Amino acid sequence: MKTLISSLFILFAFTSLKAQISTGEDGKYYADNNSLYSGTYTESFANGNLKMSMELKNGLAEGQTLIYSEEGKLLETRSYSNGLFNGDWFTYNPEGLKVAEAHYVNNKKDGKWYIWDNSGKLRYEMEYRAGVKTGTWKEWNENGELVREKNYE
């Protein structure tokens, strides 16, 4: 019995150890042995709920990052490649309704962007190509009426 208790204590002690991850002056994430970190990095609120979950590869964001509210609701999804903004980004209100959609390619705004109000009505539509405004930007009022257009072509 004493051996079982000792074994359980050792198992618990080793599984509860967690590598300390820190951000270097270069903006990269490092493990406690000063090597570039690869794996899942998480942060939690004081209440224990997950605040953020980020995939890292060689110290840089890679893949999806998820941001949560203190109550545990998903607020944002972000996409990265080699530490750069790359892919789709979505923002949600506390009720879970999508309120923004953005797209990046190699750290530059690229593609259609949308912003909805908290009731789900589309308010803005924008477009970028390699970080430059393009296309026809539109704005709608709370009644869904188109109130402004501006052409960037």
Image: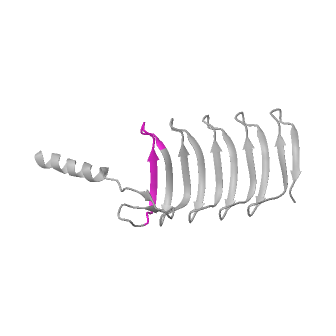
> Exactly how many numbered labels are in the figure?
0
In the image shown, does 120 or 19 lie closer to the viewer? Answer: 19
Q: Is residue 4 left or right of residue 50?
A: left
Residue drawn at point x = 84 percent, y = 56 percent: 135
Task: Give the position of the N terminus as an image quadrant.
Answer: top left
Residue drawn at point x = 88 percent, y = 40 percent: 147
Residue drawn at point x = 86 percent, y = 57 percent: 152
Residue 7: x %, y % from top left: 18, 51
* Magenta stretch bounds: 36-50
Q: Is residue 134 left or right of residue 55?
A: right
The relative height of residue 109 versus residue 73 in the rendered view (above or below) is below
Residue drawn at point x = 38 percent, y = 65 percent: 34
In the image shown, does 11 or 76 lie closer to the viewer? Answer: 76
Is 3 colored magenta in this rendering?
A: no
Residue 105: x %, y % from top left: 68, 63
In which image quadrant can residue 79 be found? bottom right
Q: Residue furthest left?
A: 2
Q: Is residue 91 left or right of residue 53?
A: right
Task: Give the position of the C terminus as an image quadrant.
Answer: bottom right
Q: How is the image coloured?
A: one colour
Is 43 colored magenta in this rendering?
A: yes
The relative height of residue 120 versus residue 7 in the rendered view (above or below) is above
Residue 130: x %, y % from top left: 74, 64
Q: Is residue 124 left or right of residue 23?
A: right
Residue 141: x %, y % from top left: 82, 36
